[in-house]
Image (spheres, helix red, strand yellow):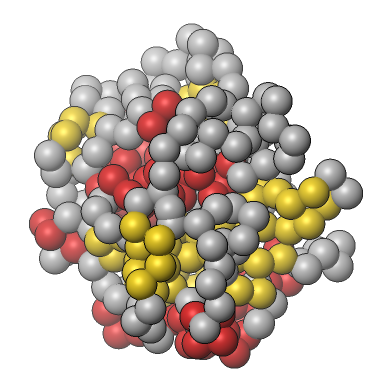
Amino acid sequence: MKGSGLPSPGKSRLGATLVFPLVCLLVATALPLAAQSVPIPTGLAAKGLTQGASPATVAETFTGLPYRVDGTLDEQGRYTLFERPDQIFSSPGLNCSGLVLSLSRYLLGRNIALSQATHDRLGDSGPDSPLGKDWDFGWDLIWNIASLAGNPTVLLPRAACVMNQGNNGLTQRGFALSDTAAWGEVLIQMRPGTMVLGSVSKMTPAGLRHHHVVLILPQAGGRTLLYHATPKTGVHRLEISRPEGLRFFIEEMERGGSKKMILLLEAALPARASAR
């Protein structure tokens, strides 16, 4: 992916200002959510995805969808691939990025184009990049989506806040994903009426990779729900405000012994959606 431009400004919840920078005939009549019309596949409509649904109801309609490598929804509500948007599937299937993008469309009421979501913000991850093509795909994706909601907030534990993490995917990686104490600090910062997008990164023999993304919905009463898609389980939900839910997520991500980090961006939901 080619492109240029700088990430939008962001703020740390703990105060320091930081500079950061889906032939498919499953589509029902285009139904508007918030300010824009976002087409709803009939399969998701049958599960309760409607205009006026609460954020948690919207997210729940995606649970149980199967995993598809590179799978996403396009702007017409058709299941397709990020790399081959001309290839349309009659059955559902999403990867982690496809889930986060598709869910975000309905939560924000914006029919986000594939090109908007995958824009190479710093022009540093194209086919000729020394770091490898799409090495920071997850980082670009969450910043691109969160920025459409306004000025995203970076959620960090105190220890990470004192460090300048820079303004690119190499240095801005958040905190250690396995650090339960750090999770405790960021979970209490999460607020109903927002969504939190996360990019998981790890070091590989080929270098750093932002290889997985998640979407988190804080709920009233202190519940915090994480949604993501994995090859083994497909689209599923974890209640990470419960110790066992957070522990399962960490174990799910840390299989194989690799140590990973997670960057969390908070974005405000539209007032009408967040009020339900």
Rendered residue at 34%/57% (across/down): 9
Q: Position of residue 83 (x, y in %)?
A: 59, 22
Question: Dividing the image into 4 quarters, which one contains the C terminus?
Answer: bottom left
Q: Position of residue 182 (x, y in %)?
A: 57, 84
Q: Position of residue 265 (x, y in %)?
A: 42, 62
Q: Nearer the viewer, residue 74 or 234?
A: 74
Rendered residue at 50%/44% (across/down): 140
- Res. 36 image quadrant: top left
Q: Is residue 109 above or below residue 260?
A: above
Q: Nearer the viewer, residue 149 or 61?
A: 149
Question: Dividing the image into 4 quarters, which one contains the N terminus?
Answer: top right
- Res. 219 image quadrant: bottom left
Q: Is residue 139 visible?
A: yes
Rendered residue at 38%/78% (across/down): 16
Q: Nearer the viewer, residue 79 or 266?
A: 266
Rendered residue at 49%/80% (across/down): 161
Q: Is residue 213 visible?
A: no
- Res. 216 image quadrant: bottom left
